[in-house]
């Protein structure tokens, strides 16, 4: 039964990893940008949440929509300025610029907030309480809520992509930028919208991570970016539900690893990632070729 | 008919001359030698404090040269070079625990990092650009986690380097400096010779048009693997130097040998100095050291400023400082390409042209 509990806990963590991953996957799918600052931007979102709560004393959950809107605006601005300029100069420049951003953000956070970790203190009893199934399985409401949130976000993204004007524009531009341009779509603006959405999901990911564990300047690259990437690779490139599957596989692998030896938690996850990279580089869900 | 064609080809052959450089490189060779001799004499003139700073500079210089080889010549943007840097540090520490002197450990570090690079290359060989970048980052994280599991070498908190006790500190600093200088000279010299060899030609072919190179039978994967392994060896040697300089090895991602800051420093130095030139990393390292020393009382600010400068240069002066200089004055201290002489062109073409113009009535 202990194992069943581990798998369930891993599965729920997988929801959080899918939240980490979907922004990264979206930016790569639409703009072919591998955003190396992805994780650090999530950390920034978490710290903005901390700041908003400290200043306005709004309940923690209320801070989520505010931070999402702020990050979406930041995403649009960053895409239309820095990232757009980098894209037009080639993929190498894009990598250098996002890597530079990542290092700047990480060290900037360290300067302003010190290396100490801080949590998004959630006082609600809802957060700390849990329910049990049988004698061994304990499920925290909060972890379940984050998993549900991840599914809702992915479902929302899917519906947005298939049923709205901007969703269709994003897919058109992702498929063939020039053809979309000829049909009157301004790809720069569409890229901006896509970046805004990706940054919105990054904001949710950052705040959820801050609530579940604690925020510190280095988690952006140490966990968020690398786990997000592992989820994307395991699940398969360009598939939204693939990222959820990838996140779940990563979460379960980590939970099982931690059960065997507490120190093996991240290693077990990476072992599965490397296995997929070697055996099935296109990911578990995708049938296409690896780019 | 055939006779005239033959002669015209022969006469063209007489005119079309191909050399490494338009200028004579012997002088820059002599210059490099003088610089090396002066640098070797440094510990006799400056205090151990300055020598210590120079060691850090030489470590970054070695790393930057390796990253330049990877990203600038082979198109491999690695964000995981800290893996080999850390492996090098540990491959000095582990033999030292068993009684091998750390100086001999430097050889083990260099070869060990190269050996570890082979299976790691196999894992990431298929990936390109962005995917390659994050995958190497993940690999560096995996390597760190593995080393942290081994409690006999200090686990997650690191360990002091044995085997150098009883050394006079000033002598130790000077010896470390000479080791660091040797590693840096070998690294830059190695890159220079590698790029002048057939591998350099292969890399140029890949950079210009990978598909065309592949279809003409160029072994693209093999060349990239060679560069990856060579860069790992260089970073391993640099990591070994760091272990000796700090007299300890600490793993952690924040401040330790596996910190991504090492890759940030080498990458920023290369981008600022000029990606894809041998002189670039040298110039970039000087800029890096000046910034780091000026801003050292402001913690990590030098890295923030370095990052901002690197982004600005990547966007607005893509060839970096050296590239910009080269564009204006056409100077190459380490020529690895070729110059095709047009008929009648000589080294003093400009002066002759001026003389010819002035002698006109």
Image (tube, coloured by chain):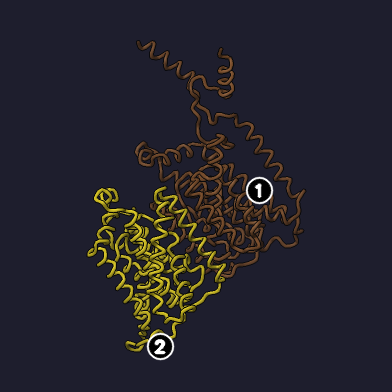
Chain colours: A yellow, B brown
Q: Residue at horizontal 35%, vertical 55%? A: A31
Which residue, given by chain and number where applicable, does mark 1 sit on?
Answer: B181
Name of the residue lying farthest toward the left:
A163
Tell me residue A7's x, y (percent): 35, 77
Which residue is nearer to you in this view: A248 or A42?
Answer: A42
Q: Residue at horizontal 42%, vertical 69%? A: A268
Tell me residue B323's x, y (percent): 53, 41
- Left or right of residue B59: residue A281: left
Which residue, given by chain and number where applicable, does mark 2 sit on?
Answer: A125
Tell me residue B45's x, y (percent): 77, 48
* Mark 1 → mark 2, Cα distance in angstroms: 61 Å
Name of the residue lying farthest toward the front:
B361
Quadrant assignment, res B325: top right
Residue B177, placed above or below residue B30: below
Residue B117, placed above or below residue B155: above
> Can I make out residue A178 in this image?
yes
């Amino acid at each position: 039964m202990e194992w069943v509990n581990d798998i369930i806990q891993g599965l729920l963590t997988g929801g959080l990893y899918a939240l980490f991953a979907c922004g990264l996957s979206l930016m790569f799918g639409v703009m072919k940008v591998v955003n190396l600052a992805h994780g650090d931007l999530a950390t920034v979102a978490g710290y903005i949440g901390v700041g908003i709560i400290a200043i306005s004393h709004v309940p923690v959950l209320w801070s989520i929509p505010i931070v999402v809107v702020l990050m979406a605006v930041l995403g649009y601005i960053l895409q239309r300025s820095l990232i757009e300029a980098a894209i037009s100069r080639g993929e190498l420049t894009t990598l250098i610029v996002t890597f530079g951003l990542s290092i700047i953000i990480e060290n900037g956070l360290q300067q302003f907030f010190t290396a100490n970790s801080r949590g998004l203190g959630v006082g609600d009893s809802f957060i700390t309480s849990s329910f049990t199934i049988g004698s061994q399985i304990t499920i925290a409401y909060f972890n379940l809520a984050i998993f549900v949130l991840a599914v809702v976000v992915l479902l929302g993204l899917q519906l947005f992509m298939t049923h709205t004007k901007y969703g269709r524009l994003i897919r058109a531009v992702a498929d063939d930028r020039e053809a979309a341009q000829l049909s009157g779509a301004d790809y720069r603006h569409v890229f901006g919208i896509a970046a805004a959405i990706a940054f919105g999901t990054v904001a949710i990911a950052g705040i959820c991570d801050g609530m579940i564990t604690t925020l510190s300047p280095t988690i952006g690259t140490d966990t968020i970016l690398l786990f997000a990437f592992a989820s994307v690779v395991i699940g398969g490139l360009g598939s939204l539900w693939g990222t959820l599957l990838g996140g779940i596989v990563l979460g379960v692998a980590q939970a099982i690893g931690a059960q065997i030896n507490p120190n093996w938690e991240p290693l077990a996850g990476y072992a599965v990632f490397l296995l997929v990279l070697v055996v099935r580089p296109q990911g578990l869900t995708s049938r296409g070729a690896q780019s | 008919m055939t006779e005239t064609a033959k002669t015209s080809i022969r006469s063209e052959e007489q005119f079309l001359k191909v050399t490494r450089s338009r200028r004579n490189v012997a002088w820059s060779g002599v210059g490099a030698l003088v610089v090396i001799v002066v640098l070797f004499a440094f510990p006799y003139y400056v205090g151990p404090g300055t020598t210590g700073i120079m060691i850090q500079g030489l470590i970054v210089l070695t790393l930057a040269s390796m990253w330049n080889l990877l990203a600038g010549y082979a198109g491999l943007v690695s964000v995981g070079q800290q893996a080999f840097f850390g492996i090098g540090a540990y491959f000095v520490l582990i033999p030292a625990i068993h009684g091998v002197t750390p100086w001999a450990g430097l050889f083990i570090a260099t070869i060990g990092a190269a050996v570890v690079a082979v299976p790691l290359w196999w894992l990431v060989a298929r990936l390109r650009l962005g995917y390659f970048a994050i995958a190497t980052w993940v690999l560096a994280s995996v390597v760190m986690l593995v080393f942290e599991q081994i409690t006999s070498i200090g686990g997650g908190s690191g360990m002091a380097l044995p085997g150098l006790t009883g050394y006079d500190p000033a002598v130790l600093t000077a010896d470390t400096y000479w080791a660091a200088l040797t590693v840096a000279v070998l690294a830059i010299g190695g890159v220079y010779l590698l790029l002048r060899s057939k591998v350099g030609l292969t890399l140029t072919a890949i950079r210009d048009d990978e598909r065309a190179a592949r279809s003409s039978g160029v072994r693209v994967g093999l060349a990239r693997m060679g560069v990856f392994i060579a860069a790992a060896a260089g970073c391993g040697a640099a990591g070994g130097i760091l272990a000796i300089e700090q007299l300890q090895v600490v793993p952690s991602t924040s401040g330790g040998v596996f910190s991504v800051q090492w890759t940030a420093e080498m990458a920023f130095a290369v981008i600022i100095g000029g990606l894809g030139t041998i002189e670039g990393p040298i110039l970039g390292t000087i800029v890096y050291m000046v910034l780091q020393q000026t801003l050292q009382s402001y913690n990590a600010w030098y890295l923030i400023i370095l990052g901002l400068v690197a982004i600005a240069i990547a966007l607005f002066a893509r060839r970096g400082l050296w590239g910009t200089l080269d564009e204006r004055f056409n100077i190459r201290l380490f020529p690895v390409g070729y110059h095709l002489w047009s008929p009648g062109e000589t080294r003093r073409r400009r002066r002759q042209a001026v003389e010819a113009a002035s002698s006109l009535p």
